[in-house]
Amino acid sequence: SNQQLLNQQNQRESNARSYPRRFPLAIQEAEGVYITDMEGNRYIDCLAGAGTLALGHNHPAVIKAMEKVLHDKLPLHTLDLTTEVKEQFVDELFSSLPVGFQDRAKVQFCGPTGGDAIEAALKLAKTATGRQSILTFQGGYHGATHGTMAISGNLGPKKRVQGLMPDTHFLPYPYDYRCPFGKGGQEGAELSATYIEQLLDDPESGILPPAAMIFETVQGEGGSIPAPIEWLQEMRRITKERGIPLIIDEVQTGIGRTGELFSFEHAGIVPDAFVLSKAIGGSLPLSVVVYDRDLDAWEPGAHIGTFRGNQMAMAAGTATLKFVKENNLSAHAKQMGEKIVQSLSEMQKNYPQLGDVRGRGLMLGVEIVDPSGKAGKDGSYPADPELTSRIQKACFDRGLILESGGRHGSVLRFLPPLIITEEQVDTIVSIFKEAVAASVA
Ligand code: PMP
């Protein structure tokens, strides 16, 4: 039963384990957008491996690609030696890049986690520039290794680990609902850009010429917060004018989730480097840094590791990338996302507890607030993590898995597989409506 396996897990596994922490289930099987627990209860999986499962669980195209590797008796582990499977993966990846970047791109296999690839990108930028300081953003999330923890915003786990990466500078992210400048929208985003530009040009700011600026175009774990398109363009201009490499963390946003294959495409910009993991491995572990040849200052062995030649992951990744492109799942994600946002926005009229509905594509969030609390200068109400948990539990009891995130754990995040159908979206919305109604009463 669920409980039996959960008891074993609780006794034997470290308490530091990752999400989803709050759901009392063990998984028996999974297919498409559904997972089934040990007692036969079925759930719609709106967490999808924290955004990993672009094609859902066990997609036939992914399974077929993995079976072929086994059937053909291809090597499963090759370190950094190349194979046809690997070169096909790189073909598929490079042909997906925006024109103009295709001829300039190099790829570094990492891994195989997102965190390792972010580490690689930071090291690459430091090597290329000979500088050390890193510009990062409040509320961002980039991983849980020492370096990635240092550049991530969430303080909880950080406070207890001394000696993280020095010379890390946190800048204000254009978080519309709780704007660091007290004004949301276009004006808040402009103020953020102006402030950052001023800081970079003032020798007294203490920011040495930085080795890199890094951000997510939509903060994921930080609470599904999309940066305005104009702000992304401003960051590209500001970094380019000052010769600062721009690294975009596409670990969660990449491969169609936001409505474009790569999320920076919304802004028509190209970073100096970007990082992919999660969806790029088609549900198996794989991560890469794609970067401009201008940054290519690495000596052999500069970023090494054992588990980079995972042929299954590359085959699954190639199949995923192909499927997303051939079936235009980016456009589908945009459409389905808009449909969810529309329904949730309508709900806000009746439920002021849904303080903010936001996101891009199928990377959405609802910030749950306490409207009886004191509103901030920007009109935002205090976060209500307690109500968030109640809604989350009510969703779970009705067969919907929604993870919470955000600085106060008060954002319910919608990250379904990109293959989600319109009908399934209707089910998600109707379960969510019932859960909210039952929880606020
Ligand atoms: N960057 C972003 C944007 C992420 O969402 C995550 C994982 N949630 C990571 C990096 C770290 O990836 P991993 O957990 O594979 O190290």
Image (spheres, helix red, strand yellow):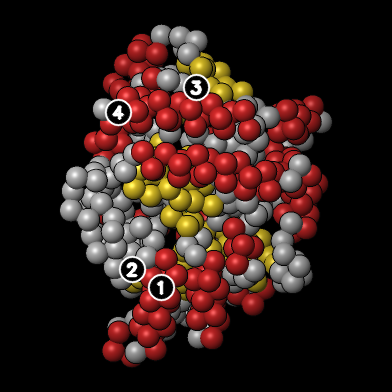
**Residue holding disc 2:** 183
The amino acid sitting under disc 2 is Lys
Q: Quick one: label 4 or label 1, which is nearer the N terminus?
A: 1
Could you tell me which quadrant the C terminus lies in?
Answer: top left
Residue 238 is labelled as none
Can residue 192 be seen here?
A: yes
**Residue holding disc 1:** 187
Q: Is mark 2 on a helix, strand or loop?
A: loop
Q: What element carries label 1?
A: helix
266 lies above or below 6: below
Q: Residues within 10 Å of mark 1 (few under 14, many from 20)?
A: some
252 lies above or below 243: above
Q: Quick one: label 3 or label 4, which is nearer the N terminus?
A: 3
Tell which of 354 and 181 is nearer to you.
354
Determine whether label 2 and label 4 are within 8 Å by CB.
no
Question: Disc 2 versus disc 1: distance between alpha carbons?
Answer: 7 Å
Determine whether label 2 and label 1 are within 8 Å by CB.
yes
Q: What element carries label 3?
A: strand
Image location (x, y in percent) of residue 300: 61, 66
Q: Quick one: label 2 or label 4, which is nearer the N terminus?
A: 2
Q: In this view, does 21 lie to the left or right of 100?
A: left
Could you tell me which quadrant the N terminus lies in?
Answer: top left
Image location (x, y in percent) of residue 209: 42, 84
Q: Is residue 274 left or right of residue 19?
A: right
The amino acid sitting under disc 4 is Ser
Q: Quick one: label 1 or label 3, which is nearer the N terminus?
A: 3
**Residue holding disc 4:** 439
